[in-house]
């Protein structure tokens, strides 16, 4: 579904052992000031003790109708940050993305995929909503959300695939739960940012719980009603479910978060921590729908890192430990692995932001300075100008989202 143009942005020494910071080691705890103790630090400093400097060290005050204008800049004591991060990188990347990917359509705005006949998928609308609320861009947020609402199906959720004119594609009326949860969380952020989105947020959360969570509280990939469908690990976002519980008062969401960790650990390789694109719900075995760490699975470390950084959940830090160790040992992060860490069959390329960015976030809980610094540098080299052969809808989207997290600008405003 995601045909990406090959990109040859070679990231030298991304995480090879010979390039480690002198005092850096992996630990199961959150990023501390030394990077070696595994205890939560108070400043989120890097493994060598040098502070991570991401623009101004204080959040911007309320302005222009936004309670949390960019830069939000809320660093977590539970995570480390790249020493080379810069708020200006996010602003430049967003401006580039907005100009290339967000277009007007009847009913509002949509995020297009230029590499796929300018079509739209619901996940893209959700990514755009998350980005625009972080950037305090209300016009763009409302345009995207208005379009999403105009394409709801019988479940009250957005149909997942539309053509370049904004029409639902044949056979694509079903919803994709990763898009739906991203939209729901973006609405919660929007309510904190500007106010007035409470009803939309709680309605979206209720629809997800009714149609995309199984009777055993497993987060399902769609609204088909198939209780035993394969699971997509990259859809599992336990930090969101905690926010949904707080917003809706539905304690069941806490169990959904617990089940997400059960499934993540069931699906992960015991040595590398890598998960497949899809796994069998009952056994955790890789599914024939996607057996390798590919373009779906690559998003997984980002989603788990949210819970590590926002909520200091030890399960998140522990889950990311093996994955962070694996990526820290790679000289280049490629776009496809077997779960044992060997390169998957086919042609694979380094420097794809959708892989490199989330891989970098796997090093945030343990504050792996080299992995953070170099993955960040690789991602911004693609997203800021949008001229690289590796720049497209998917790499652009995941590049910016990981930049936002790595600069402290994707914060859990719902907890404030």
Image: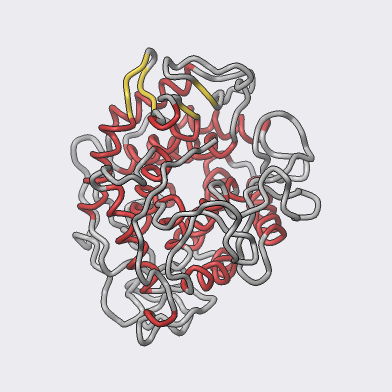
Front one among 3 and 139:
3
Residue 238 appears left or right of 279: left
Give the position of the N terminus as an image quadrant: top right
Front one among 246 and 19:
19
Residue 219 appears left or right of 351: right
- Residue 352 image offset from top left, x and y in percent: 41, 52
- Residue 106 image offset from top left, x and y in percent: 37, 12
Image quadrant of residue 350? bottom left
Rendered position, 317 above or below 20: above
Front one among 103 and 345:
345
Residue 297 appears left or right of 50: right
- Residue 172 image offset from top left, x and y in percent: 60, 22
Image quadrant of residue 31? bottom left
Can see residue 312?
Answer: yes
Front one among 302 and 214:
302
Can see residue 191?
Answer: no
Q: Residue at x 36, y 46 (%)?
A: 390
Give the colouring mode of the picture: secondary structure
Rendered position, 220 above or below 412: above
Image quadrant of residue 191? top left
Q: Residue at x 59, y 66 (%)?
A: 341
- Residue 166 image offset from top left, x and y in percent: 44, 17
Count the marks: 0
Q: Residue at x 40, y 52 (%)?
A: 353
Q: Farthest residue in the bottom direction?
A: 22
């Amino acid at each position: 579904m995601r045909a990406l143009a090959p990109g040859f942005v070679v990231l030298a020494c991304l995480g090879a052992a010979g390039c480690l910071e002198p005092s850096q080691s992996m630990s199961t705890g959150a990023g501390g000031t030394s990077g070696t103790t595994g205890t939560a630090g108070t400043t989120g400093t890097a493994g060598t003790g040098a502070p991570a400097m991401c623009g101004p060290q204080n959040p911007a005050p309320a302005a222009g109708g936004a309670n949390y204008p960019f830069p939000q800049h809320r660093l977590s004591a539970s995570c480390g940050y790249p020493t080379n991060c810069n708020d200006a990188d996010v602003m430049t990347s967003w401006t580039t993305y907005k100009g290339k990917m967000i277009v007007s359509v009847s009913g509002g705005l949509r995020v297009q995929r230029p590499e796929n006949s300018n079509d739209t998928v619901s996940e893209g609308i959700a990514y755009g909503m998350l980005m625009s609320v972080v950037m305090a861009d209300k016009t763009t947020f409302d345009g995207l959300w208005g379009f999403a609402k105009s394409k709801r199906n019988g479940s009250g959720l957005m149909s997942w695939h539309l053509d370049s004119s904004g029409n639902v594609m044949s056979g694509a009326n079903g919803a994709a739960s990763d898009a739906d949860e991203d939209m729901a969380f973006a609405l919660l952020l929007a309510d904190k940012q500007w106010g007035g989105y409470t009803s939309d947020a709680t309605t979206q959360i209720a629809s997800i719980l009714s149609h995309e969570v199984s009777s055993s509280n497993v987060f399902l990939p769609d609204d088909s009603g198939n209780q035993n469908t394969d699971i997509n690990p990259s859809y599992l976002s336990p930090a969101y479910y905690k926010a949904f519980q707080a917003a809706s008062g539905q304690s069941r969401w806490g169990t959904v978060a617990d089940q997400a960790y059960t499934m993540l650990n069931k699906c992960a390789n015991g040595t590398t921590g890598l998960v497949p694109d899809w796994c069998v719900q009952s056994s955790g075995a890789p599914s024939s729908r996607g057996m390798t760490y590919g373009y779906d699975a690559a998003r997984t470390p980002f989603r788990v890192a949210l819970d590590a950084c926002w909520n200091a959940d030890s399960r998140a830090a522990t889950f990311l430990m093996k994955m962070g160790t694996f990526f820290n040992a790679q000289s280049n992060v490629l776009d496809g692995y077997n779960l044992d860490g060997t390169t998957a069959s086919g042609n694979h390329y380094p420097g794809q932001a959708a892989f490199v960015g989330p891989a970098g976030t796997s090093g945030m809980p343990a504050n792996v300075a080299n992995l953070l610094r170099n993955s960040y540098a690789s991602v911004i080299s693609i997203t800021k100008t949008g001229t690289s052969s590796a720049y497209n809808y998917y790499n652009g989207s995941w590049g910016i989202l990981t930049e936002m997290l790595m600069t402290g600008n994707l914060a859990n405003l719902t907890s404030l």
